[in-house]
Image (cartoon, coloured by chain):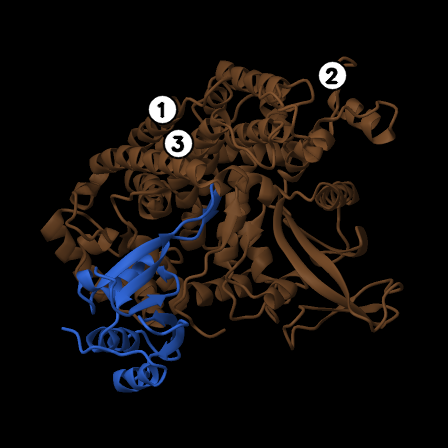
Chain colours: A blue, B brown
Amino acid sequence: MANEGAVLTTSGLSQSDQADLLDFLPPDAVEFRPVKLPPGELGEPMTAIAIISLSFVAITSICAWLSVKGKGVKFSASVTAPGVSAAVDLTLTNESKPEAVREQLEKQGVQVPDGK
Amino acid sequence: MEPSIAAVRNSFSMRTGVARLRSLPPSVLLDLAMQRLPSAVLTTPLVHEIVHHACANSAVNIALQYRWLELLRLNLSSPGFGYAVYDDHVALAADLAATEAVFQPFAEGIANFAEFDCAVPDSKIVRTTTLGFVDALTWRLLACKPGVGSHVDDLCGLLRKEQLHEQTVARKKNILCNPVYPSSGDGVYLLGYLSVKSLWNRCVESDPSWVLRPAPFLHFVMDYFYEDWGLAQILMTPGRIQVNRVLDRLARRFEKLLNSSDLSGKAVAFVSDFDKRQRQRGTLRRGPEELQHGGFAGLDLSKEEIQQGMRATMFFYETCIGPCGAVSRQQSIPEISNLQHQILTAAQPRDLSEVSAYAKRHSVPENCAIRVLDFILEIPQNKRPYCFLLDVKVMITARSANHLILSIAGEPGSERVLPTPDAAGFDATPRAGRLFGVVASTSIPWRLYCMLMYQGKVAALWGHGDQPSDSAECGKILQTIATEMQMEEVTQLSFQSMNDYLTKNELAKGVVTEAADAAAIRVSEQIRKILTNAGWSGLMRKPGSLDFGLRNIVKGNLATLAAAGICASFSTTRPELEELMQLAGYRLQDALEMSERVKQESGVTLIRVEGNRIQVRV
């Protein structure tokens, strides 16, 4: 995955969420980075943060994924983009609309390419 | 609580015995201490972490902890402690991490089996069934929920409700999505779970008279792997840890057990033997119990293996951990004065009461120096029999002469009232304290001791239900907590910081991580081979670029299968299973059709149907 443009970074995703997300996003649009526990610790199953190339297609895919996950689901992410000094925090729900997310990001100076 | 996709990991340190319940906000941890757990909090994830402690309090993990203490002793006694790391210490840390990675699939498999398969008994069977320690744990945690009472049917009903909840189904689905070809210890959950579940499946499928429930069966599996004195002996062979020998023995014993024509007989023999000893006189601590009354039935251990393992463990303690044990061979650099090193290694005068008491406790000969670091290394050993479940920073105020208010700083609404015989010493001014919750995990009845500490002293003390039942045990725990707090204050060290000391160095971290990952890959390879011959060959094939475990062979919603497995822990008869599945929001028929498709496409049997009986194999 090329990271030159804006990227959306998720909080820790479970293994099954990673699998489900890939039903909506092409594998080359996302990179999963495992969050490891320190030596000697046993923890709950592997989590990973997902780093996703930001595009309108990606946002649409994420919204579609969330919409099938059921009521009241919340999802936190942050967006970093060239030329934007601070990361933009994003909270998405199963009711989030791609257009509204794009508008919210663009208001904060993040350009969202259409993508493919 | 709001459902959130962000996965926050609870964890348990096999080295320090401390659980970190990160998925619960501190105010809920307060509720747990007050035995008023909100109904939205699931019980079995807590059981999962406490079961890790049950594994930690075992022959094998004593040996593993001794290896960690050896490393700590070398670190703490090295003249460069605090600013340098040494190659020989890094090599030991890498060995230790690799060995822990070898055990990880089994540790997680056991904890997940406890979480998803161990339903507590209802009144129809409770008088005739054998209980396991997981039953006792689950009952007690369920009883911490408001309004549930203590009738076994109420507790069983509440567990059923929680287990059929979408969050539990999602947790199980997550296990089933773990890779078949993990690249690190963080991905071994499916292989570990299938290992334990395959042992269970083998008993169910091969023994028509099989009646043991999952909880006592799990006790057998846990002891088979973790009370292996032969393995302890390998771990306690001085020098570098022989990781390959550890892996080989563990894998061979697993393979032998799974392929044993008498697996169910071994499990029943172990449970009967354990139960008989408990009823007759109560068992001693593990080790002395085997020494005085012989090894437990069913564990495939000879008397010689037990004796040699114990001897090796004691010898290792004396030569590598205790006051007469080796210290770092590193030379101090004359130009550098390391005050911390001087404090940690200075011989303490024997006429100090604490020092003479230490010498008496450990029978330390006169010619051995007793150092500050010896007191530090004693703490984790004293903590080992207990699971340190809660450690919460709280603000304390007094509401009346016999009521304290505990709250979490910066968390409005977190105030909880604590009735106490004596609230003197507190007023309306908030004072910072620490709340500890400690569990004796494998004992029945299960106990939770809670201690509110303020300025190094006990401000309040309470146990589950009523006052702590065993004052000697409670006194020991209190002493250990107070000593640790004192150590943290005097040395500015914590076990977390000592544990992380080497891996804060990026190079050392790289070496340790690489060793652990390589070991996880090797143990996974062994498990795959063994499971391949146990009916899982269709799943064990190398997938394409994406490896999401059972999703590699299951087309459709894996949650249906996860739910079927959970429901089958309550009943395996078709009409009841159908009803349970419906309650969970799924259809048994969908799971059966999914299983049939997988059987045709990959040859793997996920669900076995025999007349009216349905066995979900995952």
Q: Position of residue A111 (x, y in %)?
A: 27, 79
- CB atoms of marks 2 and 3 within 8 Å: no
Instruction: Give how far apart the Cα atoms at labels 2 and 3 are.
Output: 49 Å
Q: Chain of mark 1?
A: B
Which residue is under mark 3? B265
Left/right of residue B429 with respect to residue A33 in the rendered view: right
Instruction: Give how far apart the Cα atoms at labels 2 and 1 are.
Output: 35 Å
Q: Residues within 10 Å of mark 3 (few under 14, many from 20)?
A: some
Please tell me which residue lies in front, B584 or B557. B557
Image disc number at residue B244 = 1
Q: Earlier in the sequence, mark 2 or mark 3?
A: 3
Q: Earlier in the sequence, mark 1 or mark 3?
A: 1
Q: Position of residue B528 (x, y in %)?
A: 25, 37
Check disc 3 and give the amino acid type: Gly
Q: Position of residue B387 (x, y in %)?
A: 60, 46
Residue at left offset 30%, top offset 51%: B178
Please tell me which residue lies in front, A11 or B548. A11
Image disc number at residue B559 = none
Q: Considering the numbered disc 1 on the image, is that residue within a helix, a strand or a loop?
A: helix
Which residue is under mark 2? B368
Q: Residues within 10 Å of mark 2 (few under 14, many from 20)?
A: few
Q: Chain of mark 2?
A: B
Q: With respect to residue B188, does B225 lie above or below?
A: above
Q: Considering the numbered disc 3 on the image, is that residue within a helix, a strand or a loop?
A: helix
Q: Nearer the viewer, mark 2 or mark 3?
A: 2
Q: Considering the numbered disc 2 on the image, is that residue within a helix, a strand or a loop?
A: loop
Please tell me which residue lies in front, B573 or A20. A20
Left/right of residue B204 with respect to residue A116 in the rendered view: right
Q: Residues within 10 Å of mark 1 (few under 14, many from 20)?
A: some
Check disc 2 and give the amino acid type: Cys
Check disc 1 and give the amino acid type: Asn
Q: With respect to residue A32, does B254 lie above or below?
A: above
